[in-house]
Image (cartoon, helix red, strand yellow):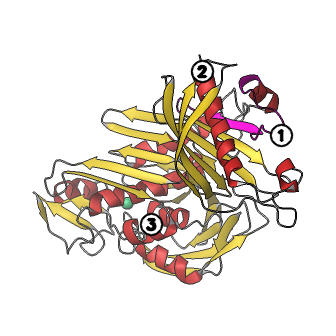
Amino acid sequence: MQYTLKSSFPLNGVGLHTGQSVTATFLPAEPDTGIRFRRVDLPESPEIAARVRHVVRADRGTSVAVGDVHVHTIEHLMAALFSMGVDNCVVELTAEEAPLLDGSSKVFVEAIRAAGIKAQHQAASKTFTIREPVHLVDGSRMLIALPSADFHVSETVSFPDPAVGTQHAAFRVTPEEFSAEIAPARTFGFVSEADELRNKGMIKGASLENAVVFENGKLISGPLRFSDEPVRHKILDLLGDLALLGRPIRGRIVAFRSGHAFNVRFVRMLVDRYLKTPEGIEESAGPSTADFPLDISAIQQVLPHRYPFLLVDRILGMSETTAVGLKNVTGNESFFQGHFPDRPVMPGVLIVEAIAQVGAILLLTRLNKKGKIVYFLGLDKVKWRKPVVPGDQVILECTAVNIGGRIGAMEGKAFVEGALVAEGLFKYAVSD
Ligand SMILES: [Zn+2]
């Protein structure tokens, strides 16, 4: 399912770098529109899709352009739409830079909340699911994407000025968490670099009202909104750049000293690696590797289970330690005949068994032990959170806590439409 705004709203402000007055009007948009900018101050109101392929600059802000038509400093606005779950929106601008407002995403978020968000039921979500570890390193900068059940971002920053120093923060990014913990964090800078930026014609719209400013170990602007406001703002900026992927992310992003140019390189890498066909066209809903998905006959070469006890239809992807599988639960499942004829519900223990089968496929493939048998020695922390009924597509995820030995443990989870339906800790032994 995709989401758009329920109603439109305008926001007025000045641009951070140009200092120009601008009105940004946020409009609901059709499914699959994505986020698009429309320059209504130019003849024929040209549009630019907010996608990484259109990024032309990423120093001190992220800019997109098509031909001579530019939109600068889009990241705080993008972070707000992306993190609040707005997939489709047209943003009309009366100048070439997004409004800075208070230097954070707070005002955008409040306006999005006031306008409301509307589900577009007919349109399938295009979530980008991280299925294997991906990383980019450049000196002391690093970005890593890891498989995870939900969207999670952590960041570590390190600045020579002792007023900031080294800071670390981590959040599960939901609209609630973003609104409360990330969106209010303002852009920040150091007096020592202000002159150089001004000489380059930048930060004309910056002031002590819309930025946190430090000088020689001291805060010289008003009070901080969070004691670690700078690292939170770095997460906000990173979210704004990850939004250029053009789809929601399911995975864990771990960042060290991220910045716009580096973030954009990382997003480009994800697009090039996972969202392009050999012809270079962006497509597909998420990463897969050459060997995946594994279909039912490939699964049967690894697992000894057969109908009616083979409960995995497909393996979507596998990293060194995580496997993600899929089970389409149809009305014809044998267990629905007795559980229960009038109100069919998939037995919870069979959901656990399905997770375990994905775990067994991971172990047997990674340990190169096809044809062996995985025995489960114990189950811990098992919880069932929602019933699974005919028509559900269950995503099964199993992560090995320690892999390689004959005995070990795995964390397993099952999801339906992104919601956790069951989880548990599985202890196992592999037969020799
Ligand atoms: Zn920023």
In the rendered image, is residue 67 in sight? no
Q: Amino acid at mark 2?
A: Ser
**Label 1 sits on residue:** 308
Residue drawn where x is 44% and y is 67% of the image? 177
Indicate the position of residue 413 as horizontal and vertical percent values: 59, 48
SS assignment at label 3: helix
Q: Main secondary structure of the magenta part?
A: loop
Q: Amino acid at mark 1?
A: Pro
* Residue 431: mark: 2
Mark 3: few/some/many CA within 10 Å (<14, 14-19, 20+): many
SS assignment at label 1: loop
Tell which tag, 2 or 3, sits nearer the viewer. Answer: 2
Q: Amino acid at mark 3?
A: Phe
* Residue 178: mark: 3
29 vs 55: above or below = below
For the record, the magenta segment spans 301-321
Tell which of 115 and 198 is nearer to you. Answer: 115
Whole-number angstrom distance, CA of label 3 to CA of label 1? 44 Å
Label 1 CB less than 8 angstroms from ligand 1: no
Among the two numbered marks 2 and 3 on one chain, the one whose residue lies closer to the N terminus? 3
Mark 1: few/some/many CA within 10 Å (<14, 14-19, 20+): few
Tell which of 283 and 345 is nearer to you. Answer: 345
Tell which of 229 and 317 is nearer to you. Answer: 317
Among the two numbered marks 3 and 1 on one chain, the one whose residue lies closer to the N terminus? 3
Q: Quadrant of ligand 1?
A: bottom left
Residue drawn where x is 15% and y is 69% of the image? 220
Indicate the quadrant containing the N terminus: top left, top right, bottom left or bottom right. Answer: bottom right
